[in-house]
Amino acid sequence: MLTKEDFKKQKKEAKHEIALIEQEFQNLQQKIDSPLHEKDKLWDDEEVKQLTRKRKERKYSSWTIELCTIIEELLNQLYQLTHQKRFNSIQLMKTPAYRSLSNIEILQAELKNQRLSLKSGMENVEEEITKVFQLRNKLIHSNFSYASILRENHDAKQEFESILDTVKQYRKYLKYNQPEN
């Protein structure tokens, strides 16, 4: 059975993993273009800028997928601790209410029925995390093209910052509800 201590431990672990990605993101923003391309004089300045932009977008893609994986692992661990069994989305999708839902939505619904919820007033974060997972799925199905997930009026950096912020908020506002005796 899930205890408050188990819950805190799982949340703390996810927080540290998210912080590592955030640190990598900040480090990438502070780096100047690599001098490696200048050594062999194969590329001009514009080509170096293009290579650097592509590399950053690949990093944003991988971090987006990793952030979603961290949240899935968190919810999966909480599900296993709560139900004392592995999460089986195929079995749960046989339930009519879950047929059209994604794994993240099923996990959220299953855990909401037990002891987990989002802090009051933060219900929109649940919708936002679902959108992040939809962006992740689109990213995967479009051959990791970060341009395919950019929303209107966003650049790659803004989009990733938005995704990172949503994941951090979701983890932060996830709360444990004490069982009633």
Image: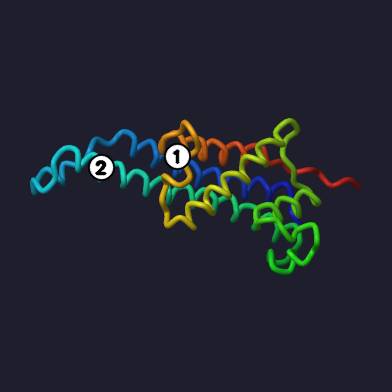
- Give the residue at the far right of this rendering: 181
Q: Amino acid at mark 1?
A: Glu
- Image position, residue 150 (x, y; %): 46, 40
Task: Look at 34% across and 43% down and name the residue there.
Answer: 56
- Residue that carries the numbered disc 1 in the rendered image: 22
Q: Quadrant of the N terminus?
A: bottom right
Task: Look at 38% across and 42% down and name the residue there.
Answer: 24
111 w.r.t. 46: above or below: below
Observer-nearest of 114 and 154: 154
- Residue that carries the numbered disc 2 in the rendered image: 50
Structural crowding at the residue carrying mark 2, measured as other residues with C-alpha within 10 Å and reported as few (<14), some (14–19) or many (≥20): few
Q: Amino acid at mark 2?
A: Gln
Q: How many marks?
A: 2
- Image position, residue 167 (x, y; %): 56, 41
Which mark is on residue 129?
Answer: none
Q: Secondary structure at mark 2?
A: helix
Observer-nearest of 130 and 3: 130
Observer-nearest of 156 and 16: 156
Task: Look at 72% across and 39% down and name the residue there.
Answer: 118
Q: CA distance from mark 2 to mark 1?
A: 23 Å
